[in-house]
Image: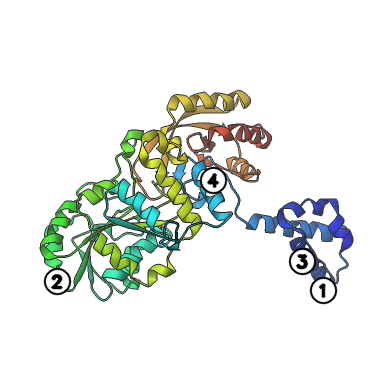
Amino acid sequence: MHRILKDESIAGYEAELGRERIRRAAEEVIGRARLSGDGQGYDAIVATLRERLDDLRGASPTPVINATGILLHTNLGRAPLSADAVTAVASFGGGYSNLEYDLETGERGSRHAAIGEALRTITGAQDALVVNNCAAAVFLVLDTFAKGREVIVARSQLVEIGGGFRVPEVLERSGAKLVEVGTTNRVYIEDFERALSPRTALLLRMHASNYRIEGFAHDPSARDLVMLGRRAGVPVVEDLGGGALCDLAEYGTAHERTVQETIGDGVALVTFSGDKLIGGPQAGIVAGRANLIARIRNNPLLRALRVGKLTIAALGATLRCYRDRAARERLPLYRKLAATLDELSERAKAYVGALPCASAGESVAYLGGGALPQASIASIAIAVPSERPQQLAARLRAEEPPIVTRIERGRLLLDLRTIAPEEDRFVIASLLSAYVPL
Ligand SMILES: *Cc1c(COP(=O)(O)O)cnc(C)c1O
């Protein structure tokens, strides 16, 4: 054992895994070798142990370089945090804070106060609160207002938005009864009107996310629903999912309904994610009428879904970037969206200069994260011809940090819109070492 732990090829793992984990893994491997009784030599045991340590190392999440062109890639952790948010997380996380402490009175305060204030200012909502993610926010709203009662939803919006979040199932689990109206492609306000009953708790409007019905299609507008809801005394809830706080059309992509517009339409409560179009940490936000938010605050379930101090620190720093466009572009998501094609083409030169068989060309990047499936963003990608693009992609994924690419028509593509400029040098060097000439 002593000799194994001192072995040069094993000692290199110590900084990352720590001595104790290595010792435990070594015990396990040696124990198994003894049991098998086939007299494995020292070298074979060390080789097995190294495989085991590689597995252990791979098991913890690691930063990657996103060359896919999908800005909010759910599998790659969605929005990267801004430097301000990272600093806030480090200073909040590394010490004590006034998370639930009022510095003026010296008494207990609310962890939601500062974030609530920022959200009120930005969105125009009367009040807001934060939970773990948007799925939790939707569930909490349904649990608070619709348990044992009915929720009317357009059939065209009864979608599954990925990760197993299916609207009808979430409704069922919350104890609400789903009343679906209209047809898959056409739903009218009259359909909602006919479905109203004394048991109706909410009218629910859902962002169809990664799904779109084209052609002969109709959905009632939020305003129509709000008008109907007012007459019937039933609140309208809208789940935006992405929840942009600014007009994405400024960045040359299709306009996405914003939280401000939704509140402006008179919707009683709106739910949205922190790590999609806001560009912050994973979180779910409920914003809307003060009396309804107050009822949610009294729901004991809120305690189970509450966010930690790191989320609050990161979200607070993220929201501070919404005072104007320049500040907003401190958020990596908006900085990446703001990059012009000229800037991307300029960066592409370094790639093609280093690897002459590669070429730079126009490509299409996407927001992802369930928002605007149809909205593409013009981009520039480096195309690397390869006989075995899958193998090249695998080699790039084995880099440290791993580089995640996409393959299109037999070519490996690296989309420059999602790669940060400061990552270019590393990506180029990795390409040079991973590339095997045709
Ligand atoms: C993404 C999305 C959600 C879930 O958001 P999470 O923050 O991932 O829980 C809910 N509703 C809609 C419409 C979405 O697009």
**Residue named by callout 1:** 35
Q: Would residue 252 be seen by someone viewing this image from the given angle?
A: no
Q: Amino acid at mark 3?
A: Arg
**Residue named by callout 2:** 197
| Label whose residue precedes the other's in the sequence (4 or 1) | 1
Query: Image point 60% across, 26% down: which residue?
Result: 357
Q: Amino acid at mark 1?
A: Leu
| Label whose residue precedes the other's in the sequence (1 or 2) | 1
Label 4 packing within 10 angstroms: few (<14), some (14-19), many (20+): some
Label 1 packing within 10 angstroms: few (<14), some (14-19), many (20+): few
**Vertical order, 88 against 288 (above or below):** above
Q: Nearer the viewer, mark 4 or mark 1?
A: 4
Mark 3 secondary-structure assignment: helix
Circles 4, 1 touching at the beta carbon (< 8 Å): no
Q: Amino acid at mark 2?
A: Ser
**Residue 24: mark:** 3
